[in-house]
């Protein structure tokens, strides 16, 4: 893993955390290896200005830093309130009431404010069910985010993130059968994976790895759904993955030569 740590600046502890998240009871570890292989091929082919070769090493760019500050900041504030360090224990229920994605708001529920049925499609991604939920999503963002930024650019990455959040929220609202609210950045994270898979397919023309990763992620969701006793927003993962892949089809891979 030395080359991987050198390229990303990510510690072994973070990689092990991601590994544990993806290696759920009985889930083939080859899925993690395949994702890492796709990501590695991206990193190694990223272009760098001749005068600054060290820029070939992707770093968490400004857009990733901003997303992490927004997402982590809110959850850490609420978590501190949960244990009595600041504010009130009522902060988390209030945050969920106003910011979570509630399917009922698109039906006959009364919103807390006029724009809530629309803002919830973005705000849910800034909230989490707890610190561990947050850390899992942020670990994956740090794992594959820098390589994507290097390939498509800062603004395009932001558009990919937002589009995946919207896709995840929309599919959740359409497919969810229970009124349970949904929070978390996993829709966006799955969107990044979908984009990674599609861009790698476009670059190589080989669909075997893309199919393997897609089926692997589907099996991972099924395993997690069973382990969590149904408390998993798999619809959000599906919507984010599809949205991320579709957006990736419209993005220019900066590592590929311009044919015009």
Image (cartoon, grey):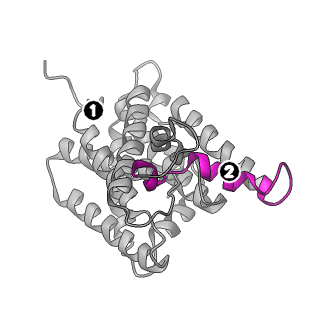
Q: Position of residue 172 (x, y in %)?
A: 38, 56
- Which residue sits at x=75%, y=55%? 90
Q: Position of residue 28 (x, y in %)?
A: 36, 75
Indicate whether residue 91 is drawn in magenta.
yes
Name, please, the residue furthest toward the right. Answer: 85
For the record, the magenta segment spans 81-107
The answer to whether the residues at label 2 and label 1 have Cβ atoms under 8 Å apart is no
| Left or right of residue 36, residue 95 in this image | right
Residue at numbered disc 1: 253
Choose between 100 and 56: the one closer to the eye: 100
Quadrant containing the C terminus is: top left
Name above or below for residue 215 compared with residue 73: below
Choose between 249 and 114: the one closer to the eye: 114
Indicate whether residue 88 is drawn in magenta.
yes
Residue 55 in view (yes/no):
yes
Which labelled disc corresponds to residue 181?
none
Name above or below for residue 99 compared with residue 228: above
Residue 39 in view (yes/no):
no
């Amino acid at each position: 893993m030395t080359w991987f740590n050198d390229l990303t600046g990510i510690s072994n502890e973070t990689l092990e955390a991601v590994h544990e998240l993806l290696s759920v009871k009985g889930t083939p570890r080859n899925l993690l290896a395949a994702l890492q292989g796709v990501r590695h091929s991206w990193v190694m082919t990223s272009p760098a200005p001749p005068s600054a070769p060290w820029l070939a090493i992707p770093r968490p760019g400004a857009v990733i830093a901003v997303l992490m500050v927004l997402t982590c900041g809110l959850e850490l504030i609420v978590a501190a309130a949960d244990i009595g360090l600041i504010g009130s224990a009522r902060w988390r229920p209030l945050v969920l009431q106003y910011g979570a994605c509630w399917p009922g708001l698109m039906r006959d529920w009364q919103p807390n404010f006029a724009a809530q049925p629309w803002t919830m499609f973005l705000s849910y991604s800034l909230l989490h069910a707890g610190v561990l939920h947050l850390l899992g999503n942020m670990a994956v963002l740090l794992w594959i985010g820098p390589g994507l930024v290097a390939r498509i650019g800062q603004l395009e990455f932001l558009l990919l993130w937002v589009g995946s959040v919207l896709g995840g929220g929309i599919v959740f609202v359409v497919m969810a059968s229970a009124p349970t609210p949904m929070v978390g950045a996993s829709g966006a994270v799955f969107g990044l994976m979908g984009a990674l898979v599609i861009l790698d397919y476009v670059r190589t023309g080989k669909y075997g790895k893309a199919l393997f990763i897609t089926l692997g992620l589907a099996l991972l969701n099924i395993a997690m759904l069973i382990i969590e006793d149904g408390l998993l927003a798999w619809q959000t993962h599906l919507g984010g993955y599809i949205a991320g892949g579709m957006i990736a089809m419209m993005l220019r891979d900066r590592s590929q030569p311009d044919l015009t």
